[in-house]
Amino acid sequence: MKTLHEGGPIQTSAPSGAPVIGPPAIQTQGLGKTFTLHLQGSTRIPVLRGVELAVVPGECVALSGPSGAGKSTLMRCLYGNYGAGEGRILLRHRGEEVDLATADPRLVREIRRETLGYVSQFLRVIPRVPTLDIVAEPLRARGVPAEEARARAAALLARLNLPAPLHALPPATFSGGEQQRVNLARGFAPHYPVLLLDEPTASLDAANRDVVVALIAEAKAKGAAIIGIFHDAEVRDRVADRLFHVSPIQAAA
Amino acid sequence: MTIETGYNFGYLDENTKRMIRRALLKAVAIPGHQVPFGSREMPLPYGWGTGGIQVTASVIGPQDRLKVIDQGADDTTNAVSIRRFFAKVAGVATTERTSGATIIQTRHRIPEVKLREGQILVYQVPMPEPLFRLEPRVSETRRMHALADYGLMHVRLYEDIARHGHIAISYNYPVMVGGRYLMSPSPIPAFDNPKMHRMPALQLFGAGREKRIYAVPPYTSVQSLDFEDHPFQPIRANAACALCGARDSYLDEVVTDDKGGRMFVCSDTDYCNTRQAAREAAE
Amino acid sequence: MSNAPLLEASGLTLRYGPVTALDDVGIEIFPGEVVAIVGESGSGKSTLLRVLSGLLKPEAGTVTYRAPDGEAADIHAMGEAALRRLHRTDWGFVHQNPRDGLRMGVSAGGNIGERLMATGARHYGSIREAATEWLRRVEIDPARIDMLPRQFSGGMQQRLQIARTLVTHPRLVFMDEPTGGLDVSVQARLLDLIRELVADLGLAVLLVTHDIAAARLLAHRLLVMRHGRVVEQGLTDRVLDDPQHEYTQLLVASVLAA
């Protein structure tokens, strides 16, 4: 098992084995998150405190820790879906360092379009939109012509063993595993420099798990920094370069 | 002057005439714009030309020679009674000759003979607002005029083409005056619309019931609304006048018996009579 | 990204007697951005829409619109003619009730063509072509081009209103509860259509709605209003998934199934 590094530029091994030293693609500094539940007598629930995580291009870091430790909360903070309560989330975006914690909504949208991808556990289904267009949409948003975007989307869906006849259907009626694969195709198609994966293989069979492992390896080879939550230990060991332990705050405090 | 009637010259009192002249001046200054005025009760019912009469009464002088037509004819009841009215209350000369008149009051026609500088054509107008069937709120039509927001009028023409294949407005065909104001030309046939464009005579419009006056000064542009691919077309019965043979005049269809017999004759009686007289003289 | 906002308002305040409809409200909308204003009835969101679109004057505050040439103009200082021109060219307004946005006595084609004709289109064939194309885009059979809106269902009327509004390719569209009076199944279709058109045309949209699901589907950014104040604003998914203000938490907890 690899050791945990925290903060600053770090050294690790690229999949090729060549050492890579460089600035992290994504890095947190003193990241903390506390929820205040106004409807429950303003109860304050601290979930994260002082998180220092840095991931360089080509590296895959798996979040570890017990259930309820805040792994998903951390992922959501990293995507900007949850606001960071304290600290900074620094990203390399368009060649510059930006702080996602303070970025205005338009900048967050731009970062999500170009730099930061997120594969959640569940597909948020948009009514009436065919699967192929759901996968092609992030490519279109980056300016890829419609035909090319659809071709790339179709190829990726095929690789994830989603039969072509399904591509034209909205995924609302798909099984959990099929929706998961649509979600994965949508996340991997644009080749984001930073990719967040929340249980990407949870409802997949062995064959499709292998495809996802291969996709992660390819993304790393292309220089993507990947942060994932993998409950499947076998998958985790195959893709992760190291673990980042997220511990429950009460225990840590 | 014509004191024998007991009325002031031209029937209206001088203050009323002044008020109407002020409205006329404003109307001439803003071609096509409807100017409100204090329309008086006249000794004839609304719809018989109360607006036209007040305009005529305000511009007529002792030296004028008046012609009055109704649908082009000098000899219909309305024309005859208005002509007699002014002969009585203003003591002015009257005529049936278009070229001999200085003021022509008209209901629903423009004479066929080209009018010249110095002549005044006074239209009787039942409804001055060209948008009234499209927009029921008067306040809104005012705003549309103020902002030259006339898309709605074209919507009406669009609907006509969509429904009938052509613009099916045969009279009271809306016009743009001076490229600015949308104007109702009064219920003249669309055939007459081109005569308004750059007419050398002054055109005055009076709507008595609606209390509005508007005007088109001499040589002002008057364009009938249309589409590039559905240009304005003046409509005329495809026939020659049965009396004078004219092929360029607006024709009325006259039923001649109860067996379906009919003929077309010039609606402009002076034009027709003049042509017939010329033909007889030539023979 | 660095471009200037299309519409910018600050310090907007308006009272109806003792009721404060707007209390120091500010907002910015950038080109291509969909911003939703959510809140319960009486929160001031519809008033804000009317003030931003120039239909209602605020007691204090300014609304500035930046024209395509970069010229910025104060909406409430400009003349009625200029404002009206804006409303039929650069702007669009989609009403909750299609009857407020359509001419019920004019055919579908005439309704779509009106804005074109108002801005100088004078070729019947092209107007008809544009109307046909827009009927297709809003999923109404072009064969119905000469039918009156009253022969259409509520959902179709609303789609027709959208076609009529978008035909001149406005840059900024105001939408007041566009799915308000419709059945749920019809709502979904309409929302999706709006989403597609907005993305295709790169429209900026200011959407007023009390439907959180609609806001999540359409909006990039969210403003939550209560008692005439903006209590919270930000990225749509962040406001809905990690609401900070007490009222937003209540709003999300009570209606959110999205």
Image: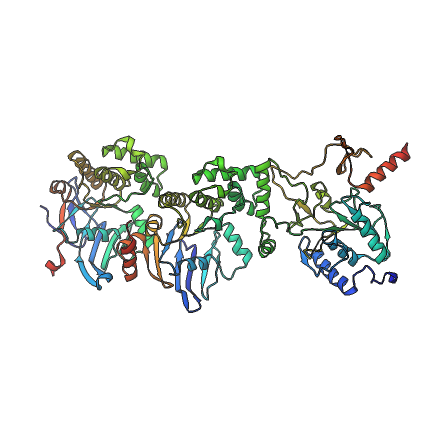
Nearest to the observer: residue A11 or residue B170: B170
Residue B113 lies, in percent from the top left, at: 80, 42
Say which of B77 and B62 sits in front: B77
**Rendered residue at 17%/33% (across/down):** A207
Quarter placement of the N terminus of chain B:
bottom right
Most foreground residue, A205 or C108: C108
Q: Quadrant of the C terminus of chain B?
A: top right
Position of A65 with respect to B94 (left or right) is left
Q: Is residue B16 above or below residue A133?
A: below
- Taking the image as shown, residue C50 lies to the left or right of residue B140, namely left
**Which residue reaches farthest bottom?**
C18
Which picture quadrant has residue B241? top right
Residue furthest out toward the left:
A1
Residue A30 in the image: x percent, y percent?
19, 59
Name the residue rendered at 57%, 44% in the picture. B155
Compared across the picture, whether B80 is left or right of B144 comes to: right
For residue C41, what is the image quadrant? bottom left
Tell me if C204 is positioned left or right of A111 in this view. right
Residue A204 location, x and y as percent? Answer: 18, 38
Q: Position of residue A68 (x, y in %)?
A: 15, 53
Residue sitting nearer the eye, A182 or B3 = B3
Q: Is residue C16 visible?
A: yes
Residue B68 visible? The answer is: no
